[in-house]
Image (cartoon, rainbow, N blue to C red):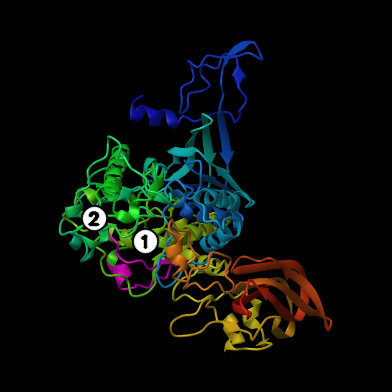
Amino acid sequence: MKRRDFFRKATVGAVGASLVPVVGNAANHNQGVVDRENDRWYQVAKGKMGTPDRQETIDCDVLVLGGGMAGISAAVSAARNGANTVLVQDRPVLGGNASSEMRVTVNQGSHKERESGIVEEILIENWVYNPQDSYNVWDHVLYGYVTREKNLRLMLNTQAISAEMDGDKIKTAICWGITNETEYKINAKQFIDCSGDGLLAATAGAEYRTGRESRNEFGEDHAPEQADGWTMGDCIMMVTKDMGKPVPFKAPHYAIPFDYEAAFKDKHRRIKQVKEGYWWVEVGDDFDIIANRENIRHKLMAYFYGVWDYIKNSGDHPEADNIALDWVGSIPGRRESRRFMGDILLNQVDLANNKTFDDAVAFGGWSFDEHNPGGIEDLSQPASYFHKGVKELYQIPYGALYSKNIQNLSFSGRNISVTHMALSSTRIIGTCSTMGQATGTAAAMCVKKGINPCELRKKHIKELQEQLLRDDAFIPRRPALDKSDLAKKADAIMGSSTISGDAKNLVDGMSRDRADKIHHWEADGLNAELQLEWKKPVSISKVELKGETVVSRKMMMHKNPEKYTKQGQINAVPPELIKTATVEARIKGKWVEVAKIEDNITRLMKTSFEQVKTTAVRIKLNETWGYKNAKLYEVRCYS
């Protein structure tokens, strides 16, 4: 079938939603992704010949494409904010580059400061269910996290391949179930493409670009003088095992010999350890990295085994004598392909100068880590240019997270509206996750208001920012100003004791400390109490707290975990986090318990109860996960 015919057929779609085989003449019924006119199914139980009808139509509010960390964050945030959400992932596991299939670390976007919100919840939960640091179990932690969310349907092994349009809006995503041979027509009001390559967005006609911009186009001094088609390359990773005795290695026939003398002229390509993969075993493309992916995959395997053959058999690395390969990736992790154009095209100058955006909704802080686009095939260039890093956390604007020409289409991850140089920083998984939480929250808000992202940005951006901050996202230099928060209107707020900070800091709108100011309250010991007082009675049904997880400390899974535990990483629930607490309200002069927090493992602690009229709220902080003091960054109250 020709490619253009394939997509023409893909837009025909299905009439029914049945998964039951139809027996009889179905000659004109299955003209969708797959033409089943010649599928002659003799169903023994019925004793008749027929045609399988594997088609389903699904209606939802928000469709998220791509189940990497950005897509998970987008889908969960959309569902939590009330949208009926579907998450489509074309692999059997969630996590994308971070899954067991590729095993890229969920790096934080800044070496100094970690993301909070949904991505932090997942990382903490992983240490509850996966203290053994297993990537295969990590896949199932992600699965459990997503599938327990109400309003969210997960569809694995399903690829979105084409968009049906209504003018400049997407009406339907045509999807193909890889394992169940089922065609899905998914109708949605808002679409978020977090798939990286963005096939659905491309078929919808969303404007995008690939390759490297010239230095003069945006004044990016790290960009090449002339624009070209190069993208940063794909790579595969590995994990090894100490066998306790010498283990021989024989390279496969397709291995490409490693030119270590040329490679080692760059210090970043040198063999510093034999436990985990080498990110510089990388192959890029100068025109169409998507079309060339299978060829790239073969090359990566060949180059990798050439490197390992050198390590094992050159005699230069005796530390590898007892080491054997335990896992080698078969699916390349991708850094760059399509970048879709939004109302803002974020560039290196914006990030380096730490530009302030009125529509900021996410943040990053990684250096301009632009890998040599030729990868291991161009040993004359360094593995990465490692351009100068940014001085502090930068803002990511909402205008870079939706399509400029398709009304109801947003993006999160490496396919957002950025230049090649800006992407070299924004592509980090933790950063992509903050984008996902932003677009998911925004999509749910668009559905409620009956508008699209561009209008949301123009008319309701402050409302979006306030909801993100309430849900424990962080936006640099943007304090929370929620007028509905009754805690801000309290006439007094006091703690039973204080050894650091001030109880008043809990309503100042900043949910983490900054270099120039403390924004927390820390009590002396546990069984501490925090009390809010109002002169006039207020009606309250929700009390929300933000605890301490030490955002300056790493929390991620690693292929070489010992390295990071030596640096102070704790592979457990942060000991500073509040584990148990109670909330009381003073009603008619008596304290009444209205909510209880037990076995908490999240920085954001939300309680909800039947509304009461009160002049005071008392929060008793009884237990942490091991730290000696009770510590909070924020308290909120709502009716």
117 on left or right of 424: right
Give the farthest residue toward the front.
245
Can residue 493 be seen here? The reply is no
What kind of residue is marked 2? Answer: Asn
Q: Residues within 10 Å of mark 2 (few under 14, many from 20)?
A: many
Q: Which mark is residue 621?
A: none
Q: Residue at x 37, y 43 (%)?
A: 202
What kind of residue is marked 1? Answer: Thr
Say how many tags the image has. 2
Q: Which circle, 1 or 2, is nearer the viewer?
A: 2
**Please, what secondary structure does the residue beneath circle 1 have?**
helix
Q: Position of residue 535 (x, y in %)?
A: 73, 87
Q: Position of residue 616 (x, y in %)?
A: 74, 82
Q: What is the magenta segment's predominant secondary structure?
A: loop
Q: Position of residue 477 (x, y in %)?
A: 44, 76
Seen in the picture, residue 125 relative to 519 is either above or below; the reply is above
Q: What residue did someone put label 2 on?
A: 372
Tags 1 and 2 in contact by the CB under 8 Å rule? no
Query: Mark 1 or 2 closer to N-term?
Result: 2
**Please, what secondary structure does the residue beneath circle 2 have?**
loop
Q: Residue at x 46, y 80 (%)?
A: 514
Q: Position of residue 355 (x, y in %)?
A: 34, 72
Q: Residue at x 28, y 68 (%)?
A: 349
619 on left or right of 500: right
Magenta region: 349-373
Q: What residue did someone put label 1 on?
A: 426
Give the quarter of the figure containing the N terminus: top left
